[in-house]
Amino acid sequence: MNLRLCTRCILPETFPNIKFDADGVCHHCHQEESALAKSIAKKAEYRQKLDDLISATRDKTPAYDAIMAYSGGKDSSYTLKLLKERYGLRIIALTLDNHFVSPTAWDNIRAVVDKLGVDHMTFRPSWPLLKTLFCVTAREDIFSPATLLRASTICTACIGIVKSLVLKTALEMSIPLVGFGWSPGQAPIQSAIMKTNPSLIRQNQKALKAALPPDLLSSMAPYLLPDNYYDLYKDAFPYNIHPLAFFDYDEERIKTELKEIDWRAPTNTDTNSTNCMLNGFANQCHIQRHGFHPYVWEIANMVRQGIMSRADGIEKIYSPQNPEQVLYAQQKLGL
Ligand SMILES: [Zn+2]
């Protein structure tokens, strides 16, 4: 590999605005040092915060205590297990069927929700709509430049629909907690328990609508928040929680615990996503356009936090995408 990498994390020289010191350590590693020390101390504080929040919200609404954005991947499966087994919450899991969920992920979704005894629903947007959205985002970066540092444009579009749908469903069903399976590298601990703010959500939705191709906007309306919801449900906006930011995170232990709930590791997807067959192609589009892997920020964070070894991180990020999977997605999208 000719690419120069930070000697501590694995960020490459092609990562926008990166600077290296004389030892080859990147400025993100230096900036994160103090935050990292604090976040270790914060873990216990956040576990307490979640205990308090759950005591305050549990059994206060008719149907569910929490809705989980459930991809069937290992992180969201593990989060679902945690919320169900540790806290005994009444949960409904929601899966966005983006038409690229791997067969193994479907097997896992059914097995896990059955084993845990949680309700589950699938939302499958129409294929012509998603095909157009994925084709547009495969070719063009329609969101803000900042989003490109964290994810591919295809992923950002898909996750935008997921976030919007779970929030909409939470409001309509009076569910006070929305669970996400973000890994400790994907989202910082400071945002791990956060009440959704209607005016901020309104801004995000506005930005999403502005970025979407105009001809898709009206057909995507069912997935977005209607304008009257901000008033209608103003006292019912839920808390977003992503507990993996403050529970000990160890991939091997997580996989062992997941075996207990009949979750099996898929073999036919790329090394970063355990559930989505579009991911390899999305990664490849991003790497070709921007010269760095869309997961490198997340994995660099995990390496820095000592959750993943540097060698494993390098293998995850700097191995080529699975060509069969890339081809599968390309052909399905007609690209
Ligand atoms: Zn670094």
Image (cartoon, grey):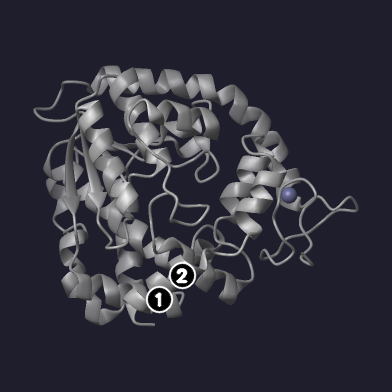
Q: Which residue is mark 2?
A: 326
- What quarter of the picture does the C terminus occupy? bottom left
- The outermost residue toward the right is 22
Rendered residue at 17%/66% (across/down): 221
Q: Give SS at disc 1.
A: helix
Residue at 46% from the left image edge and 70% from the top image edge: 326
**Residue 31 x %, y %:** 71, 45
Find disc 1 in the rendering and name its residue: 330
Secondary structure at badge 2 equals helix
Q: Do labels 2 and 1 touch, CB within 8 Å?
A: yes
**Image height of 266 relative to 134, above or below:** above
Quadrant, the N terminus: bottom right
Query: Residue at coordinates 49% horizontally, 40% vertically from top-left?
Result: 183
251 and 291: which one is in front?
Answer: 251
Q: Is 211 left or right of 65, judged from the image as shown?
A: right
> Residue 80: percent from the left, percent from the top?
32, 32
Vertical order, 276 against 189 (above or below): below
Classify residue 250 as left or right of residue 91: right
Q: Position of residue 296 (x, y in %)?
A: 61, 55
Question: Is 75 placed left or right of 177 in the picture?
Answer: right
Tell me how many marks there are: 2
Q: Nearer the viewer, residue 333 or 218?
A: 333
Q: Which amino acid lies under the numbered mark 1 shown in the image of this protein?
A: Gln
Q: CA distance from mark 2 to mark 1?
A: 6 Å
Q: For the point 49% across and 60% down, which residue is it?
A: 151
Q: What numbered label is drawn on residue 249?
A: none
What amino acid type should be assigned to the residue bearing mark 2? Val
- Residue nearest the viewer, comparing 173 with 104: 104
Q: Is residue 99 visible?
A: yes
Q: Is mark 2 within 8 Å of ligand 1?
A: no
